[in-house]
Amino acid sequence: EPEVTQTPSHQVTQMGQEVILRCVPISNHLYFYWYRQILGQKVEFLVSFYNNEISEKSEIFDDQFSVERPDGSNFTLKIRSTKLEDSAMYFCASSKLETLGQFFGPGTRLTVL
Amino acid sequence: AQSVSQHNHHVILSEAASLELGCNYSYGGTVNLFWYVQYPGQHLQLLLKYFSGDPLVKGIKGFEAEFIKSKFSFNLRKPSVQWSDTAEYFCAVNGKEYGNKLVFGAGTILRVKS
């Protein structure tokens, strides 16, 4: 069964550094999402992406964040200058259609020191 | 703003006991409802979903959920749990009027004692 994959599984970085989290969505899916979960808190929506552009973003997704689909298979989340409070588990998800269930990757645990 | 409430944060059951996990949502439009499960060390997996039609939906591994529109609820049930059902369960909702982002509940950690 096809799955969403994410790399790396764990990323440790210093405050102020840039990080890029990578995702490979399921191949025939058209809608892509990033969510995050700070330890002990709810899973929160960050951004959705369709047809090579952002379709929706949350308040969390400020100018420090960007997403890209550079080559038709990867979907990346970049954090330009990480802050301590960016430490969280970041999940990528994809769906075939807007209204169908979203399939999640295993997550990348980001630790900002 | 839309929100999802899960009533119990931790549930402990013995094998063969029946399970019901509560989920209520606050949402001003047509909803799609989901239950996701996260087994220890694994990623979120879709357990079942409701879009329309029969309000009683059946998912994988013997789980089912009932949508009660008048109560804004989508409770998850299983008649007889197994040790392998130990996991965290998340209720989520989305809907066209608010974009298609999923809004999650806080999750319920289920531990099944063998």
Image: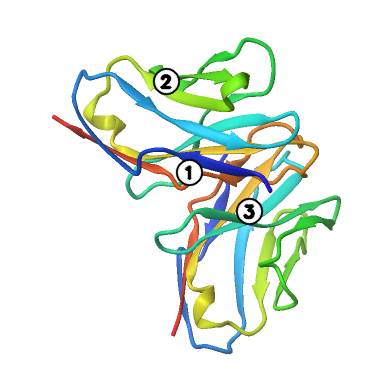
Chain that bears disc 3: A
At numbered mark 2, what does the secondary structure look like: helix, strand or loop? loop
Residue type, label 2: Phe
Q: Residue B86: give x, y in percent of width and height.
A: 28, 36
Q: CA–CA distance between discs 1 and 2?
A: 16 Å
> Which mark's residue is nearer the viewer, 1 or 2?
2
Can you identify the residue that label 3 sits on?
A: A24
Q: Label 2: which residue?
A: B63
Query: In this rendering, which labeled residue sits more in front, label 2 or label 3?
Result: 2
Callout in the foreground (1, 3): 1
Point out residue A19 in the picture as x, y percentages from the top left corner: 59, 78
Q: Nearer the viewer, residue B96 or A11?
A: B96
Q: Residue at x 40, y 21 (%)?
A: B77
Tell whether B14 sits left or right of B60.
left
**In which quadrant of the rendered view does residue B9 lie?**
top left
Determine the secondary structure under disc 1. loop
Horizontally, residue B55 falls left or right of residue B39, namely: right
Instruction: Out of B79 and A3, give the one closest to the viewer.
Output: B79
Q: Which residue ends up furthest to the top in the rendered image?
A: B54
Residue holding disc 1: B44
Disc 1 with disc 3 on a shared chain: no
